[in-house]
């Protein structure tokens, strides 16, 4: 791999970590209430907890994944796959929000909610690509 490709991957990984960390902190603070809207009702039954707990736990997971992307270079590939799996795991929330037409932070129109669905595969690919050796 060329130095330019390594630099590009490193930048992509750090950007992904910043995105995850920022989203995680938002889940735990200012946007916590708004993110509850994205949690499907069935998720509370399956996980036997409430929506707020799901939002808090997902925020903590995002922060931990962000830190892991930056601090565990020897486990980079596994961390990348864990980030990709996390993005897959939260996708039903995006579908739920689109189907119910409920507003959440930054997703206040049907079009934005629909376009958001197509961002998820990009995030999965970003996580996998940026952590390849």
Image (cartoon, rainbow, N blue to C red):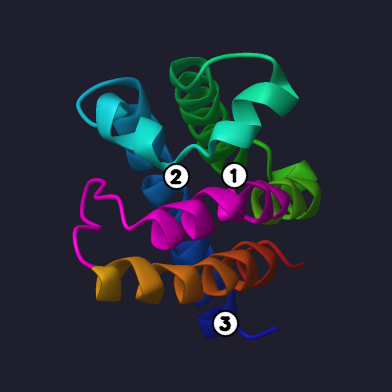
Label 3 environment density (alpha carbons within 10 Å; few <14, some 14–19, many ≥20): few
Q: Of callouts 3 and 1, which one flags the residue occurring earlier in the amino acid sequence?
A: 3
**In the structure shown, which secondary structural element does the residue marked by tag 1 occupy?**
helix
Name the residue rendered at 34%, 66% in the picture. 113
The stretch of residues the image draws in magenta is 85-109
Residue 43 shown in magenta: no
Q: Quadrant of the C terminus?
A: bottom right
Q: Depth-wise, is mark 1 or mark 2 nearer the camera?
A: 2
Q: Of callouts 2 and 3, which one flags the residue occurring earlier in the amino acid sequence?
A: 3
- Is residue 128 rendered to the left or right of residue 71? right
Q: Nearer the viewer, residue 44 or 33?
A: 44
The answer to whether residue 34 is above or below residue 53 is: below
How far apart marks 3 and 1 lie (CA) works out to 18 Å
Q: Depth-wise, is mark 2 or mark 3 nearer the camera?
A: 2
The residue wearing badge 1 is: 69
- Is residue 34 rendered to the left or right of residue 70? left
Q: Main secondary structure of the magenta part?
A: helix
Res 127 → quadrant:
bottom right
């Amino acid at each position: 791999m060329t130095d330019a490709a390594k630099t590009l991957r490193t930048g992509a990984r750090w950007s992904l970590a910043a995105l995850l960390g920022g989203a995680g902190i938002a889940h735990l603070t200012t946007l916590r209430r708004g993110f509850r809207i994205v949690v499907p009702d069935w998720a509370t039954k399956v996980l036997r907890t409430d929506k707020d707990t799901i939002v808090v736990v997902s925020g903590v997971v995002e922060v931990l994944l962000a830190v892991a992307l930056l601090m565990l270079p020897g486990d980079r590939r596994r961390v990348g796959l864990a980030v990709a799996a996390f993005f897959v795991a939260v996708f039903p929330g995006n579908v739920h929000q689109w189907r119910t037409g409920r507003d959440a932070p930054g997703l206040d129109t049907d079009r934005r909610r629909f376009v958001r669905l197509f961002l998820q595969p990009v995030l999965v690919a970003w996580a996998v690509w940026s952590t390849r050796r």
